[in-house]
Image (cartoon, rainbow, N blue to C red):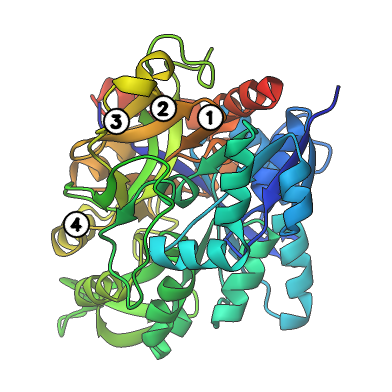
Amino acid sequence: MTKDVVVLDYGSGNVRSAVRALERVGASVTLTADPVAALACDGLFVPGVGNFHACMAGLAAAQGPRIIDRRLSGGRPVLGVCVGMQVLFEGSTEPSATPVEGLGEWPGTVERLPAAVVPHMGWSEVEVPSGSALLRGVEHERFYFVHSYAVQHWTLEPSGAFVRVTPKVTWARHGAPFVAAVENGPLAATQFHPEKSGDAGATLLENWVRSL
Amino acid sequence: MPVATRVIACLDVDAGRVVKGVNFENLRDAGDPVELAKVYDAQGVDELTFLDVTASSGNRETTYDVVRRTAEQVFIPLTVGGGVRTVDDVDRLLRAGADKVGVNTAAIARPELIAEIAERFGAQVLVLSADVRRRIGDDGRPTDDFVMTTHGGRTPVDLDAVEWCARAAALGAGEILLNSMDADGTKDGFDLELIRRVRAAVSVPVIASGGAGRVEHFAPAVAAGADAVLAASVFHFGELTVGQVKDALRAAGVVVR
């Protein structure tokens, strides 16, 4: 059965590629900011580029936080990409005249990459944990990254309620190791752009769409 | 492993058509930028750059259409430059499906444009396209001083190229497309001194452009500090494939995808 995916349209950069890349792997895709459609779809794709705080503000204006919360409480899948992943953490050190907090779905702060050349722009390898469903079949491929900030410390210890649902964390490196992808039940995210990562990216998106 | 050195193919596009002829076989329409983009994608190119040389602004719609069709069929990053003057121009290109936008002449005329674009869309969308020439000395020979030019290299500007690149990066350019107008078209290799100077002055990625003729030209550009290498005509005319360039880079110890 064809899976319905909504790409959340809240005024963030090039979303056309995300729509087409998802259609290419068989999803029926709608680009919209309509909260009803964003709640009802099988999978919600949350894009995001530019400044963390501007992105978060745009997301908030589109009721994004509420939509994401509601979906997650019902176990309904959400995939955040690039800054769409960063806003799932608690906050960012990226400069802003009007700093705002992130969604805090995961603990951690988005910080500037300590590398000689920033932005990290290009194709990098990733270190995929065993059992990753999202990156199945593309564990040894490179993915396309464009970012200056990233989460460099994963602090969610597998304890208490999380023992049985430990999030799977994929790492990459640019100046320091950073979180490149997270799979956590219905909530998944990538710092890289699967929609711009050629065939490897298509496989990842296909893995996600099939899981919906 | 570090981020892979990118190999970028550039296409000059005029009113929706590739400017120069090509000799790729099996192309339905060798003048269609979308068809060529697919060929380069299949060859393993890491990024594509379209340089829009459309003179008339009335034909801009054709450019947006080409960007749209490319973004719908090729799933690697696409930069579009040429004639970008305002934040609205950037918005339209991003909406059409461009991932990055190159600015050149308009930013020299009004440097605040860089900050405006970076603030609205983020530094990662903004490629400073720098067309650079060596200043001609009193003896009529090229010196080691680099100056900016505008309008496709035709108009020299009294602006030090290395300082301009550093200033543009400080204003919010996420990347420098460094094009040597002296080396461009010579096929004698990249201007390595220019790459070294700009590399030392900025911490954003630097794309080396201009002068590529043979596979052995690419590794020295990387050694000089380039994060990416760009070529147009050698790919366009089928003299080199992206794969050959990557093999040569790999053989020289450069990490490629």
Q: Which structural element holds mark 2?
A: loop
Q: CA distance from mark 1 to mark 2?
A: 8 Å
Which residue is most to the front? A160
* The N terminus of chain B lies in quadrant: top left
Q: Which structural element holds mark 1?
A: loop
Q: Circle 3 sits on which residue?
A: A156
Q: Answer whether labels 3 and 4 touch (C-beta < 8 Å).
A: no
Disc 4 with disc 2 on a shared chain: yes
Q: Answer whether labels 1 and 2 touch (C-beta < 8 Å).
A: yes
Amino acid carrying label 2: it is: Arg
Q: Is residue B2 left or right of residue B119?
A: left
Tell which subunit mark 3 falls on. A
Disc 1 with disc 3 on a shared chain: no
Amino acid carrying label 1: it is: Gly
Toward the viewer: B55 or A104? A104
Toward the viewer: A17 or B173? A17
Tell which subunit mark 2 falls on. B
Q: Circle 4 sits on which residue?
A: B199
Per the rendering, the mark at residue B257 is 2
Amino acid carrying label 3: it is: Leu
Q: Is residue A85 above or below residue A43?
A: below
Q: Position of residue A23 (x, y in %)?
A: 77, 36
Q: Is residue B149 above or below residue A68?
A: below
Q: Circle 1 sits on which residue?
A: B44
Q: Answer whether labels 1 and 4 touch (C-beta < 8 Å).
A: no
Q: Answer whether labels 3 and 2 touch (C-beta < 8 Å).
A: no
Disc 1 with disc 4 on a shared chain: yes
